[in-house]
Image (tube, rainbow, N blue to C red):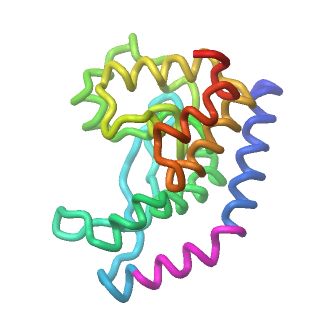
Amino acid sequence: MTPERGAARAVDRLGAGALLVIAGPILAIAALLIRIIDGAPVLFRQPRLGRGRRPFQIIKLRTMAKGRVTALGGVLRDLGIDELPQLVNVLRGEMALVGPRALTDDDVRRLGWDAAAFDLRWAVPPGITGPAQIAPVRRCHPRTTWRLDRRYVLRRSACGDAALLAASVLVPLLGKRRARRATRRLAWGRT
């Protein structure tokens, strides 16, 4: 492990630990509400591909029932609370705070990203948040997502990660477009 990668890993672990402590009460309330309103299970686990395309189990709060997003699930998704259990994935070293979205095998095949030409995307750990997740559109086109992920991997920096984390926190308050605009200069310089 390079010193730079080791430092990034340490920052991710410290950040995830601190965020779990801070978000603990919110997670506990959300879990209780899911259990009361939507029933068990509270957590959703799914195989995803991590760094080097290695599989791992992602952990999220359950937001769907019978194939549809529940009313409570919609609120949890809008606020990003459903993603908070992924902090455990960060502590385990399976994810980072910031990086490309963790995809399923099916996603990779559907997008046509299973070729070696797309390996760059898996050169870094997947993140809880990243540039494609806060893009100011409802759904990113696969080409746009690939461009954003590639750009992130090639330009990855501590300042950029900090800006993307800040934008992710601001999204529920300002909306994606304004949050991204507010943090763009810090993340990418003038673009």
> Residue 38 location in percent, x, y?
30, 81
Asked if the magenta segment contains residue 151, the reply would be no
Query: Range of the magenta residues?
Result: 22-33
> Seen in the image, is 148 located left or right of residue 87?
left
Q: Quadrant of the C terminus?
A: top right
> Which residue: 48% across, 39% down?
134
Residue 62: x %, y % from top left? 36, 67
Relative height, residue 115 to residue 158 (above, below): above
Q: What residue is at 38 percent from the left and 84 percent from the top?
A: 35
Location of the N terminus (image quadrant): top right
Q: Closest to the observer: 44 or 154?
A: 154
Residue 72: name its quadrant: bottom left
Percent coordinates x, y for residue 153 in the rendering: 57, 21
Residue 130 image position (x, y, % from top left): 53, 36
Count of numbered marks: 0
In the image, taking residue 109 as reference, residue 96 lies left or right, namely right
Say if 9 sits above or below 65 in the image: above
Mostly what secondary structure, the magenta segment? helix
Q: Is residue 16 rendered to the left or right of residue 154? A: right
Image point 54% across, 60% down: which residue? Answer: 84
Is 26 included in the stretch rendered in magenta? yes
Q: Residue furthest left?
A: 66
Q: Residue at x 61, y 37 (%)?
A: 164
